[in-house]
Protein backbone atom coordinates (compact mmCIF):
# COMPACT_ATOMS: atom_id res chain seq x y z
CA UNK A 1 0.00 0.00 0.00
CA UNK A 2 1.28 3.43 -0.94
CA UNK A 3 1.36 5.27 2.39
CA UNK A 4 1.88 8.57 0.58
CA UNK A 5 -1.81 8.37 -0.34
CA UNK A 6 -2.79 8.33 3.35
CA UNK A 7 -3.46 12.04 3.55
CA UNK A 8 -5.27 13.52 6.58
CA UNK A 9 -8.53 13.75 4.64
CA UNK A 10 -8.34 10.12 3.51
CA UNK A 11 -7.48 8.88 7.01
CA UNK A 12 -10.34 10.81 8.64
CA UNK A 13 -12.92 9.64 6.09
CA UNK A 14 -11.83 6.00 6.32
CA UNK A 15 -11.80 6.01 10.13
CA UNK A 16 -15.02 8.00 10.55
CA UNK A 17 -16.87 5.88 7.99
CA UNK A 18 -15.87 2.65 9.74
CA UNK A 19 -16.65 3.98 13.23
CA UNK A 20 -20.05 5.37 12.21
CA UNK A 21 -21.01 2.06 10.61
CA UNK A 22 -19.85 -0.10 13.54
CA UNK A 23 -21.54 1.98 16.22
CA UNK A 24 -24.82 2.10 14.31
CA UNK A 25 -25.30 -1.43 15.71
CA UNK A 26 -24.90 -0.16 19.29
CA UNK A 27 -27.65 1.51 21.35
CA UNK A 28 -28.99 4.56 19.54
CA UNK A 29 -31.83 4.94 22.03
CA UNK A 30 -32.36 3.24 25.37
CA UNK A 31 -35.43 2.95 27.57
CA UNK A 32 -35.13 2.21 31.27
CA UNK A 33 -38.57 2.08 32.93
CA UNK A 34 -38.40 3.35 36.48
CA UNK A 35 -34.67 4.01 36.28
CA UNK A 36 -33.94 0.33 36.95
CA UNK A 37 -36.12 0.16 40.06
CA UNK A 38 -38.87 -1.81 38.32
CA UNK A 39 -36.37 -4.35 37.05
CA UNK A 40 -34.88 -4.80 40.53
CA UNK A 41 -38.31 -5.25 42.12
CA UNK A 42 -39.42 -7.69 39.41
CA UNK A 43 -36.22 -9.71 39.74
CA UNK A 44 -36.70 -9.91 43.52
CA UNK A 45 -40.27 -11.15 43.01
CA UNK A 46 -39.02 -13.68 40.45
CA UNK A 47 -36.34 -15.00 42.83
CA UNK A 48 -38.88 -15.31 45.63
CA UNK A 49 -41.31 -17.13 43.33
CA UNK A 50 -38.63 -19.61 42.29
CA UNK A 51 -37.61 -20.24 45.89
CA UNK A 52 -41.21 -20.94 46.91
CA UNK A 53 -41.76 -23.18 43.87
CA UNK A 54 -38.67 -25.23 44.69
CA UNK A 55 -39.71 -25.47 48.35
CA UNK A 56 -43.11 -26.81 47.25
CA UNK A 57 -41.38 -29.22 44.82
CA UNK A 58 -42.96 -27.51 41.81
CA UNK A 59 -41.43 -26.53 38.46
CA UNK A 60 -40.51 -22.79 38.65
CA UNK A 61 -40.96 -22.46 34.88
CA UNK A 62 -44.62 -23.45 35.22
CA UNK A 63 -45.34 -21.26 38.24
CA UNK A 64 -43.27 -18.12 37.71
CA UNK A 65 -44.13 -17.17 34.14
CA UNK A 66 -45.89 -13.95 35.17
CA UNK A 67 -42.92 -12.87 37.31
CA UNK A 68 -40.55 -13.57 34.42
CA UNK A 69 -42.67 -11.43 32.10
CA UNK A 70 -42.65 -8.61 34.66
CA UNK A 71 -38.88 -8.81 34.97
CA UNK A 72 -38.55 -8.66 31.21
CA UNK A 73 -40.88 -5.66 30.96
CA UNK A 74 -38.98 -3.83 33.68
CA UNK A 75 -35.56 -4.34 32.12
CA UNK A 76 -33.71 -1.72 30.09
CA UNK A 77 -34.28 -1.89 26.34
CA UNK A 78 -31.79 -0.74 23.70
CA UNK A 79 -32.59 0.16 20.12
CA UNK A 80 -29.90 0.56 17.47
CA UNK A 81 -30.02 2.70 14.34
CA UNK A 82 -31.36 -0.25 12.31
CA UNK A 83 -34.43 -0.72 14.53
CA UNK A 84 -37.79 -0.64 12.80
CA UNK A 85 -40.28 -1.70 15.48
CA UNK A 86 -43.75 -0.70 14.33
CA UNK A 87 -45.35 -2.12 17.51
CA UNK A 88 -43.44 0.41 19.59
CA UNK A 89 -43.83 3.17 17.00
CA UNK A 90 -40.05 3.35 16.86
CA UNK A 91 -38.93 3.43 13.24
CA UNK A 92 -35.29 4.51 13.28
CA UNK A 93 -34.54 2.81 9.95
CA UNK A 94 -33.80 4.34 7.46
CA UNK A 95 -33.26 7.91 8.75
CA UNK A 96 -30.99 7.01 11.68
CA UNK A 97 -29.19 4.50 9.47
CA UNK A 98 -28.33 6.97 6.70
CA UNK A 99 -25.24 8.46 8.43
CA UNK A 100 -23.76 4.95 8.70
CA UNK A 101 -24.55 4.24 5.04
CA UNK A 102 -23.12 7.61 3.99
CA UNK A 103 -19.95 6.92 5.95
CA UNK A 104 -19.60 3.50 4.34
CA UNK A 105 -20.08 4.93 0.83
CA UNK A 106 -17.56 7.72 1.43
CA UNK A 107 -14.96 5.32 2.83
CA UNK A 108 -15.45 2.82 -0.01
CA UNK A 109 -15.15 5.50 -2.72
CA UNK A 110 -12.01 7.00 -1.20
CA UNK A 111 -10.47 3.58 -0.56
CA UNK A 112 -11.10 2.35 -4.10
CA UNK A 113 -9.89 5.58 -5.68
CA UNK A 114 -6.72 5.83 -3.61
CA UNK A 115 -5.64 2.23 -3.06
CA UNK A 116 -7.31 0.14 -5.77
CA UNK A 117 -6.70 2.71 -8.54
CA UNK A 118 -10.36 2.54 -9.58
CA UNK A 119 -11.09 5.33 -12.06
CA UNK A 120 -14.28 7.17 -11.18
CA UNK A 121 -15.78 9.91 -13.37
CA UNK A 122 -14.15 13.22 -12.47
CA UNK A 123 -17.53 14.91 -12.07
CA UNK A 124 -21.07 13.75 -11.37
CA UNK A 125 -23.83 16.24 -12.16
CA UNK A 126 -21.19 18.91 -12.39
CA UNK A 127 -19.76 18.21 -8.93
CA UNK A 128 -16.27 16.93 -8.20
CA UNK A 129 -15.72 14.20 -5.64
CA UNK A 130 -14.56 16.68 -3.01
CA UNK A 131 -17.85 18.59 -3.24
CA UNK A 132 -19.84 15.33 -3.25
CA UNK A 133 -18.12 14.19 -0.06
CA UNK A 134 -18.81 17.55 1.60
CA UNK A 135 -22.50 17.31 0.66
CA UNK A 136 -22.77 13.75 2.00
CA UNK A 137 -20.83 14.57 5.20
CA UNK A 138 -22.97 17.65 5.77
CA UNK A 139 -26.14 15.61 5.30
CA UNK A 140 -24.94 12.96 7.78
CA UNK A 141 -24.08 15.63 10.37
CA UNK A 142 -27.38 17.43 9.86
CA UNK A 143 -29.35 14.21 10.36
CA UNK A 144 -27.58 13.41 13.62
CA UNK A 145 -28.02 16.97 14.90
CA UNK A 146 -31.73 16.73 14.05
CA UNK A 147 -32.00 13.62 16.25
CA UNK A 148 -30.13 15.50 18.98
CA UNK A 149 -32.69 18.33 19.17
CA UNK A 150 -35.93 16.45 18.41
CA UNK A 151 -38.29 15.30 21.15
CA UNK A 152 -37.46 11.71 22.06
CA UNK A 153 -40.13 11.25 24.72
CA UNK A 154 -39.17 8.82 27.49
CA UNK A 155 -36.18 7.50 25.57
CA UNK A 156 -32.55 8.28 26.38
CA UNK A 157 -29.65 8.52 23.97
CA UNK A 158 -27.47 5.44 23.94
CA UNK A 159 -23.71 5.18 23.60
CA UNK A 160 -24.00 4.38 19.90
CA UNK A 161 -25.83 7.63 19.20
CA UNK A 162 -23.04 9.80 20.59
CA UNK A 163 -20.33 7.93 18.68
CA UNK A 164 -22.39 8.17 15.48
CA UNK A 165 -22.80 11.91 16.07
CA UNK A 166 -19.04 12.36 16.49
CA UNK A 167 -18.40 10.09 13.50
CA UNK A 168 -20.74 12.13 11.29
CA UNK A 169 -19.02 15.38 12.27
CA UNK A 170 -15.68 13.70 11.52
CA UNK A 171 -17.02 12.70 8.09
CA UNK A 172 -17.74 16.35 7.32
CA UNK A 173 -14.32 17.46 8.57
CA UNK A 174 -12.63 14.71 6.55
CA UNK A 175 -14.62 15.69 3.47
CA UNK A 176 -13.45 19.30 3.74
CA UNK A 177 -9.84 18.18 4.14
CA UNK A 178 -10.19 15.73 1.25
CA UNK A 179 -11.70 18.42 -0.99
CA UNK A 180 -8.77 20.75 -0.29
CA UNK A 181 -6.28 17.98 -0.95
CA UNK A 182 -7.96 17.14 -4.26
CA UNK A 183 -7.99 20.81 -5.28
CA UNK A 184 -4.29 21.17 -4.44
CA UNK A 185 -3.45 18.14 -6.58
CA UNK A 186 -0.72 15.59 -5.93
CA UNK A 187 2.33 16.85 -4.15
CA UNK A 188 5.20 17.46 -6.55
CA UNK A 189 8.55 16.06 -5.46
CA UNK A 190 11.32 18.61 -4.84
CA UNK A 191 13.66 19.18 -7.78
CA UNK A 192 16.87 17.19 -7.72
CA UNK A 193 19.96 19.01 -6.46
CA UNK A 194 22.12 20.53 -9.18
CA UNK A 195 24.84 18.29 -10.50
CA UNK A 196 28.33 19.02 -9.27
CA UNK A 197 30.52 20.70 -11.90
CA UNK A 198 33.03 18.39 -13.52
CA UNK A 199 36.49 18.47 -12.00
CA UNK A 200 39.60 18.64 -14.13
Image (cartoon, rainbow, N blue to C red):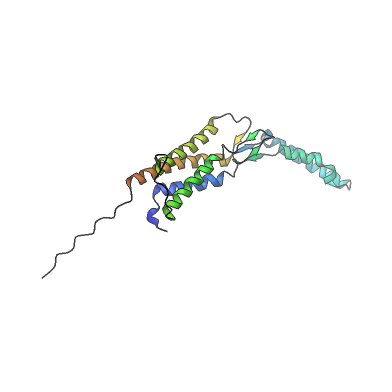
At a point 47% along the width and 39% down the height, the residue shown is: 136
At a point 53% along the width and 30% down the height, the residue shown is: 149
On-image quarter of the C terminus: bottom left
| Residue 186: % across, % down | 33, 51
| Residue 109: % across, % down | 46, 48
Residue at the extreme bottom: 200
Relative placement, left or right, of 134 versus 63 is: left
Relative placement, left or right, of 159 versus 175 is: right
| Residue 95: % across, % down | 56, 36
Residue 106 shows in this picture: yes
Relative placement, left or right, of 102 versus 193 is: right
Give the image quarter of residue 72. Answer: top right
| Residue 62: % across, % down | 85, 44
Residue 14 shows in this picture: no
Q: Is residue 6 above or below residue 123?
A: below
At a point 82% along the width and 46% down the height, the residue shown is: 61
Residue at the extreme left: 200
Give the image quarter of residue 197. Answer: bottom left
Which residue occupies the foreground of this view, 11 or 60? 11
Q: Is residue 10 above or below residue 148?
A: below
Residue at the extreme right: 56
Relative placement, left or right, of 52 versus 97 is: right
On-image quarter of the N terminus: bottom left
Q: How many marks?
A: 0
Which residue occupies the foreground of this view, 37 or 131? 131
Which residue occupies the foreground of this view, 26 or 55? 26
Amino acid sequence: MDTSKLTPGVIVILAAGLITLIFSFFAFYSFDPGGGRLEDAANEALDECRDQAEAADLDPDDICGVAEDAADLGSEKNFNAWTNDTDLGLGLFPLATLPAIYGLLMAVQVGLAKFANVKFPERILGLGWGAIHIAIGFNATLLMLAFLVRDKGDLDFGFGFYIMLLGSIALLVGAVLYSREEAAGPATPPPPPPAAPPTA
